Amino acid sequence: MANAITERLAASPQRHFSPAAEAAVIGSILLDGDVIAEVLSLINCEDFYLDKHRKLFSLVTEMFMAGDQIDSVLVRDRMETVGLLDEIGFDYYAKLLEAVPIAANAAYYAQQVKDKRRYRDLLTAVSNAANVVDESLPVDEQIEKVRSIVFGMADQSGQEAYSFAEYAEAVSQEDPNVETILTGFRDLDNVTGGFQPGQLVVLAGRPSMGKSALGLDIAVKQAEYGAGVIIFSLEMTHKQLIRRLLRTETAEKLASLDITISGADTVEKQVAMIKAKQGRCDLVVIDYLQQMKTDKAETKNVEVGNITRDLKKLALRENLTVLLESQLNRGPEQRPDRRPRMSDLRDSGSVEQDADIVMLMFRADYYRKEDGLEKDHTAEVIVDKNRDGATGVVKLMFSEECVRFGDLTYGAY
């Protein structure tokens, strides 16, 4: 397969790059330096196939970023200063000036360059996938690696732009609560304002603080409101989760909920599951971050950063909320009050950066039990970060027998 792709490239080079389109982009900029802003919204220097075009486009980009004027004379002078004119040749530079009659079609030529780059990326992905098939790995691992290759292709959605002039009036007419995902715990919703599609919400705690139970409760309440939910449970089986819920819910009630449980432990597998789900998917619950798998990186921080970054992209791309549960390090155990802080997040830098909301679980009862003191059957959710709203501490009821949370103010599980 890989050899066939190489042969295809050699047989039809016009499919994977266009010297004329690349020259036309640069020629347009030399004719009218103002078009570079529009061109840069579409492509960058890595989209060029020919090295001399890549270097020249990089040079004019540097001039633009420095605030310098751009025209054919000034660019030629800068090329001469850095030695690029000798490398490319004055005659070739002169031909670039003749590549287009006017600069008005610069964006059209830039899109051609981008399309050729995407075709090359596609061929590379197919070639890499073909090489995976030749590896002596279990078929499940091969499938996962192929999915990773496909998922890793450049996502172009982030280049879309929306003007206030076009959308401000329409958005002002929308009900801001239509897409809000309420947790079902009214005091918590009053602080956070609920969750929004596109958000990465982190729910963190030390072992036995109840983060898995709260994540499950939120998933059930969401499904009761009509949301489609997927739970990626990496520590408990689907039967264990259902048995826990059957302590307080009937089988008929659970059967009516649109909840799917999966053990998929990589972002690539989770994406595939979301896309394969019948019906809507509004909320994804992942229990928990430290059990997820990814390609090995130089440090654990980088590995975790790759996961949280991909999960944030997933939330944005699929227009859903990701509720990611995470362990805390032993920091709280070293404090007299044992209360958690956001800095206690394991490998915390990327988690704090990528998350829209960070909630920390704390149950003083857990420590009261250790100390032989009377319990008050409450728990705290510390909203330590909220990109779009307030922070604060929310108290909930907690039943150890049923492993369920409830509203403290409103008195209901």
Image (spheres, helix red, strand yellow):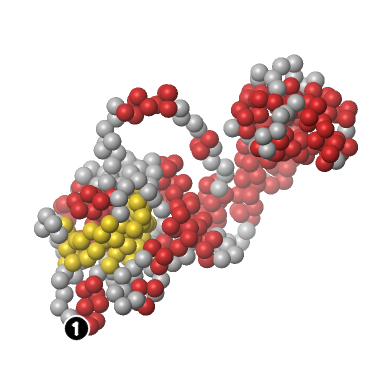
Instruction: Please give left or right for residue 396 compared with residue 331 in the image.
Output: left
The residue positioned 35% from the left and 63% from the top of the image is: 204
Coordinates of residue 1 in the picture (x, y in percent): 67, 46
The residue positioned 82% from the left and 41% from the top of the image is: 82
Coordinates of residue 49 in the picture (x, y in percent): 73, 37
Residue 21 occupies which quadrant of the picture? Answer: top right
- Residue 222 visible from this viewpoint: no
Task: Please identify the residue farthest to the bottom as the structure is shown.
Answer: 372
Task: Using the image, determine if residue 82 lies above or below residue 19.
Answer: below
Which residue is at the front of the view, 133 or 274? 274
Coordinates of residue 250 in the picture (x, y in percent): 14, 56
Task: Using the image, determine if residue 391 lies above or below residue 346.
Answer: above
- Residue 203 visible from this viewpoint: yes
Instruction: Please give left or right for residue 67 compared with residue 74 in the image.
Output: left
The mark tally for this picture is 1
The residue positioned 29% from the left and 74% from the top of the image is: 337
User: Mark 1: which amino acid?
Assistant: Gly
Which residue is at the front of the view, 281 or 359? 359
Coordinates of residue 295 in the picture (x, y in percent): 55, 60
The residue positioned 29% from the left and 39% from the top of the image is: 179
Task: Please identify the residue farthest to the top as the structure is shown.
Answer: 101
Which quadrant is the C terminus positioned in?
Answer: bottom left
Mark 1: which secondary structure? loop
| Residue holding disc 1 | 372
